[in-house]
Amino acid sequence: MASQAQVNPKRQQELQLQYSNYKNTLQQLAQKIGDIEQEAEEHKLVIETLDPLPKDRKCFRMVNGVLVERTVEDVLPSLKTNSDGLKQVLEELLKQYKSKQTDLDNWKVGKLVSGGPRFGSPDGYYQAGSTPPGDTLAPWFNLGEGHNAQENHDDILDIDLAKRLTSNVTHPTQVSSEAQMSVRSNLSDRVPYAMPFLAGSSLTSPVRLLNSKVDATILDDRLARIYHAIITGCASRFVDYDCNLYATTSHYRLQSWSEGSSQRHTPATLDNSTNTPFTNTPASVAQLNAISFPDSEMPSNDVSCTFTVIGAVRFLDHFAGLYGNRLSATARRQSDAALKSVLRTFSLQWLPSESTSAADSILQDSIHGIPTSEASKNAFYDSWFQAREIISQAQSVRSFRVVYAILLFCGITIPAKAPVESARKFLDSGLQSLCSLNELIRQHCHTLGAHSIYSGLLEASLNAVHWGGYIRDLGASLTTNRPCRLPIPGHSKVLFSTGSVLSTFDWTNDHCFPPGLDDSIASICQKAVAEAFYICRQIIEVKNQLHCDASLFCMEDVASTVAAVSKFNHQFRPFINYCINNLERLSLPSRTASVSLVLFWDLSILILAEALALDKESDSVDDTIITSMRIYQAEAVSSVTKTVECVLSLAPDSAFNIENGLDAEVPLIAYHITPSLTATVYQKSIETLMNFQQSPLYTGEIVDEDWQGQVDIVLKGLSSLGVTVGGSEAAERVLQSLMPRYGDILSECWTSDFST
């Protein structure tokens, strides 16, 4: 019997490829089966609802993108025809699936000997021939009378059945929307509730606000694209449902860079134009495609939806008068002005700091002979000070637009000409408004009841904004001695199930990168970020206690926090190292997710270690804790250095940058929503390296050349931020802090690659 180690590597690769082909084909078939089975169930529910109604009852129908009025008599025959056709399609696809499954089983018998190579099942895949975990194929083969796999799905889509029957399995099926009606699902448990045509059925439906984006009426086209690229990427990494410890059973997804990829088990998007440039999709014409409802065990208002951050903000403000937050005309104007001003300032951060033709086009009215780099900075300065003034006047207005403007503004790089505290004073007032609005909306959702679609949408939108406020609160307190204002979220989420890729894959084997693994990495990073945020709150509490001379009373908290850090490192450090070592193999979303995770986590460790080091002279901190933290501290610095080295070795994604209004040379390390926080990571790393060199405890542990190399690499990372206006300001502020203390040492370590 051959062992796995004895299998010829080339032969093993061939087997892996063959297996992957079978697996991908089965997955694509399963996705089709699930999609069509879901639509068949939807048609059945609508037909059962419309049949008893008078034939002249009015309903709405989407025809060529236009909502038109029809009668039940007009609509019912086509629905029944489609329903019959869907059943035929399902039968055909099930035959194909069973045939392919048989082919795979026969292949396994013929090709895989006992003890031979085994292939795991990354997250998002099921192992062919076994019972799939969770919401996978199991319900799709139970098409009898009692089948109800998508009991709570509300939206009905008419389809072109001929294309269904003739299409192959290479790509997931694309659904063309021709009819759109809504009914309450769960017919067996109906409660008296007035629902003539439900959420999203009219062109003026507030639901359409959820997918609204920044258009040319608010920002210049290029600034709008920059805003979308930065916010979309960061929000999906940090604020999505899987990261959100405030999240309730109202599921949601935030639109991401990879929104175009179709995944069967992610919530349906509210916008059917995700592949279209967002500047062509203003709020007034955003199309509602589908509102999906998860499995029947979830509450009835658990609407799974995809929306934008600014869409959630607009949606929440839209109902202000209904949940008891009446806004005067003046307050509404102030809210709009604050948000518009901050959006512009936020986006200006990512203009190139050096002269480029692209930058010229956006600053042409400001140049007048001034170099573009100066014009970019001047535009940013002017916009920042103007935004600060507008927010100062609007901060008393209790609206989500003002809250969002404050949260964004407090993450914008503070110009060198402004005092550091000039932006932070707004944060507390913004968080206070968020807390009071949170109470109003929770009560309003309770009033709407468990069977309300809008209750679920409001709750999901609020959860996203609330978590964004928590992150901003956390970030502000991490780097200062400020206490957090928002309450600690209850951490009851099961982030990783038994048998997940995180626990089953060998992350220490950098050379193994099976097909499909990249699809799991961004998801793992999201859940790891949630855990990191939870521990970071503990770090902040301990840091502030140590700073306040309360160390004698917080030793239990210190020990608990260090234990949590140790547990996180044990669980995620191999995964983090694997991602960084394989950075060139990862997709852009996985790269940015990995880099964001490692930099935030390493910064948290460095700040905790710094706080404990400052307190060690009081003898209140146990020596074993100090020793453990020194190890984690050295590991964090090494991790930051390796990450910067790997990122800078990659060519910038010029196509992505240009498409999204950025300079072609912007590195992915500069995509972070808070440039100053990224610069702080480098500052803390350099300060730690300086302390390593000066401490006798580390003599001989780091070779001088290696130490100099680490300093040089981290300095290169700091310097790379200078490609954008905001990054340049953040890097300059850090250098102004470091140079008076370590200028000669840093100069000694700095290298260049001139060839003459």
Image: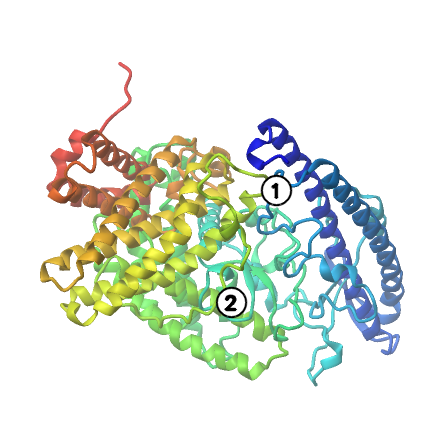
Query: Which one is nearer the viewer's eye here, 176 or 519?
Result: 519
- Please determine whether, in this image, residue 4 is positioned above or below residue 324: above
- What residue is shown with label 1? 118
Quadrant (top left/top right/bottom left/bottom right) for the N terminus: top right
Q: With 215 as the anchor, is 546 left or right in this view?
A: left
Residue 474's label in the rendered image is: none
Q: With 201 as the anchor, is 517 left or right in this view?
A: left
Q: What residue sits 51% from the left and 39% below the top?
A: 659
Q: What residue sits 21% from the left and 34% below the top?
A: 707
**SS type, badge 2:** helix
Q: CA distance from mark 2 to mark 1?
A: 43 Å
Percent x, y of residue 689: 20, 41
**SS type, badge 1:** loop
Number of residues whose C-alpha sits closer than 10 Å to that of mark 2, classed few (under 14), some (14–19) or many (20 or more): many
- What residue is shown with label 2? 461
Quadrant (top left/top right/bottom left/bottom right) for the C terminus: top left
- Please determine whether, in this image, residue 3 is positioned above or below residue 602: above
Q: With 204 as the anchor, is 723 left or right in this view?
A: left
Percent x, y of residue 331: 40, 72
Q: Amino acid at mark 2?
A: Ser
Pointer 2 with pointer 1, Cβ within 8 A: no
- Please determine whether, in this image, residue 577 is positioned above or below residue 674: above
Q: With 267 as the anchor, is 63 left or right in this view?
A: right
Percent x, y of residue 662: 43, 39
Colour mapping: rainbow
